[in-house]
Amino acid sequence: MVRRDEIRPGEVAVEPPAATDAGLVFIGRIRTPWTDRMDCPRQGRRDGPVCRIELFAPWDGGLDGLERYASIEVLYWLDRSRRDLLRQSPKSDGTSRGTFSLRSPVRPNPIGTSLVTLVGIAGGVVSVRGLDCLDGTPLIDLKPDRCGFTPLAPRQPGDDDVDTGRAGVPPA
């Protein structure tokens, strides 16, 4: 388990540049049972506790239609995460990997995402199961689960690139 501000063997930290180019607007707060990183699950579970996503006005007016989806994607700002590690040792075994190959909350821009089960919507509060963030985490956005969403655009060449298995990515 990661301890606060710990640098493990094999990890590399850098001095991040000053933030000057983003203008994020937090549209709400997430309410979960966890107040400490040591207690928070590493990945959300669909059978986890019901958590509340409280949207601020006027953003609560944008929830209309969200109830049609069984699953939604929640994007949030991991405001209590470090932002300086290039390499991390997730198993604390001395081996390390690049930050972008991990789902760790420690990242230059600590944006968290969870695919959650929608439990219900009452006013500006969305109840869900499957979150893995601390109580009070700032909310960035909510989106329907992309697997349950029908795209409006017609299919395009390359949508099903069988050579790579990755749409839109040319073979190496």
Image: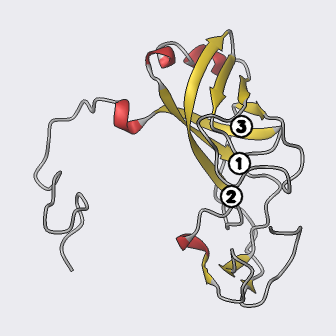
Quadrant location of residue 99? bottom right
What percent of the width, then of the height, locates residue 20? 70, 61
Residue highlighted by disc 2:
110
Query: Would residue 21 appear left or right of 71 to someone viewing this image?
Result: right
What percent of the width, then of the height, locates residue 165? 22, 62
Count of numbered badges drawn on the protein: 3
The answer for how far apart the CA atoms under marks 2 and 1 are is 6 Å
Query: Would residue 77 appear left or right of 115 to someone viewing this image?
Result: right
Amino acid found under the numbered disc labelled 3: Phe
What percent of the width, then of the height, locates residue 120? 61, 15
Residue highlighted by disc 3:
26
What percent of the width, then of the height, locates residue 159? 17, 51
Residue positioned 53% across, 72% down in the render: 101
Where disc 2 sits, the SS reads loop
Which quadrant: the C terminus?
bottom left
Q: Are marks 2 and 1 in contact (CB under 8 Å)?
A: yes
Residue highlighted by disc 1:
77
Quadrant location of residue 81? bottom right
Amino acid found under the numbered disc labelled 2: Pro
10 in relation to 68, above or below: below
* Number of the front mark, 3 or 1: 1
Where disc 3 sits, the SS reads loop
Residue positioned 50% across, 15% down in the render: 67
Amino acid found under the numbered disc labelled 1: Trp
